[in-house]
Amino acid sequence: MLVAVLTYVGYGVLTLFGYLRDFMRQWKIEKCQNATEREEQKDFVPLYQDFENFYNRNLYMRIRDSWNRPICSVPGAKVDMMERVSHDYNWTFTYTGRVIKDIINMGSYNYLGFAQKTGACQEAAAKVLSQYGAGVCSTRQEMGNLDKHEELEKLVARFLGVESAMAYGMGFATNSMNIPALVGKGCLILSDELNHASLVLGARLSGATIRIFKHNIISGADMQSLEKLLKDAIVHGQPRTRRPWKKILILVEGIYSMEGSIVRLPEVIALKKKYKSYLYLDEAHSIGALGPSGRGVVDYFGLNPEDVDVMMGTFTKSFGAAGGYIGGKKELIDYLRTYSHSAAYATSMSPPVVEQIITSVKCIMGEDGTTIGRARVQQLAENTRYFRRRLKEMGFIIYGNEDSPVVPLMLYMPAKIGAFGREMLKRNIGVVVVGFPATPIIESRARFCLSAAHTKEMLDTALKEINEVGDLLQLKYSRRRLVPLLDRPFDETTYEETED
């Protein structure tokens, strides 16, 4: 309660000072550096909402240096970062020319460590680049359909255990452009309240009716909320006419990227079957990162892929590439090839990117003749459990499932958002800090993303620095500290317990 009150007080003080500074800018006492409408446009409708402008000017600008930091290396376990300074309180930045070397990267979605400049993936991509070039300069339906695209889609379908799959050049557009092709007016979408912006945009573009169910993984309230919406949808039908809905589509994610929580897929599938609806599963963060064989949340729970009607995912995280895919029944994929805007109008995927995905997927499946892929999946799981347990032992409040490689560490107070990012960078640890509007206003957090490329030494170094910064900024809010245990839920030969 004390932390919540102090957080609200912090935002209140920032808001008061923001209004004071806006008053000073209006009377030319303080120079106004934000973008404003030209004098001849003063009678136009403003381009931005007033609160968005206010927030950007007076709150975001104070900690703007914590975001958009330019790196100049492969986003692997360690990165090199360009140093920059600001002489006008973060309105503009100047590069010093110095490069900060060997920063431990705790922010990239490089779950399986395939973002690297050496190895089989890099060699295969370089070879394809020399043969096919960098771009296709056409859509799949015209002159941009390569044999590599066909090979990729067959491989992805086999990897997912579905009949067919289709690949797209952009993960965000995979959601936003394909949901409108699947549902429309007269259909109902039931969407988790914490779904990604691409799912939200796709749902809005479809013209379907949207209803939101609660996201509460621990207590089960999300399942009760979802079931109530399904019951009401079937009993009452469409508004006014009371006709049955043409389709009911449930939208969920595998791992929620801001919460670190894993969807309770068995219960969602049970409800979907009970009420004869369809399920759209976004596995952007879970494919490759969950399950004994890296096949995502379906593999994690040991379920049948046929129970998920639309399996969507991206290649931008675990595979170290770009783009997205949709897998499912052959009839579904054939329909999307014709009616999806992404398929009809978007340029085909770059050949080297396709080859990067093909090589990494084969590595995970073991089709390259090695066990490297399986070892990386196991290493990620071990890193995740070790890192999460150590943070809990230190007294931090962290969100999410124990097996989720996305680890949100709660900061709460606005002043601690920028302070945490800066202090960690001073110690050569690169982290992502997140605040409103990406999170609720009192739930600011730092988000760590674990990777199979992180060694035990890297994690211990990061944990040591996090512990120091936690003491410095008083971030150890938890009253339920875990006592360090000698037994671990994973192989003790990998991580031996230290004396302390």
Image (cartoon, rainbow, N blue to C red):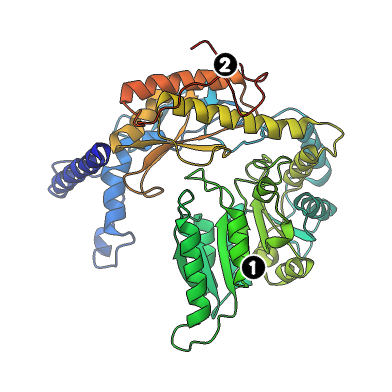
188 or 307: nearer the eye?
Answer: 307
Give the residue drawn at x 46%, y 63%: 225
Give the residue drawn at x 56%, y 36%: 108
42 or 301: nearer the eye?
Answer: 301
Residue 273 badge: 1
Q: Dot 2, how many residues are within 10 Å of its Cα: few (below 14), some (14-19), or many (20+)?
A: few
Vertical side of 405 occupied by 218: above or below = below
335 or 30: nearer the eye?
Answer: 335
Q: Dot 1, how many residues are within 10 Å of its Cα: few (below 14), some (14-19), or many (20+)?
A: few
**Residue 221 placement (x, y as % from top left):** 45, 57
What residue occupies the far right of the structure in this picture?
369
**Residue 139 placement (x, y as % from top left):** 72, 61
Residue that numbered label 2 is attached to = 497
Q: Are marks 1 and 2 in contact (CB under 8 Å)?
A: no
Vertical side of 455 occupied by 254: above or below = below
Vertical side of 127 occupied by 46: above or below = below
Left or right, 32 with respect to 140, comes to left
Left or right, 338 with respect to 101, comes to right
**Residue 210 placement (x, y as % from top left):** 48, 70
Helix, strand or loop status at disc 1: helix
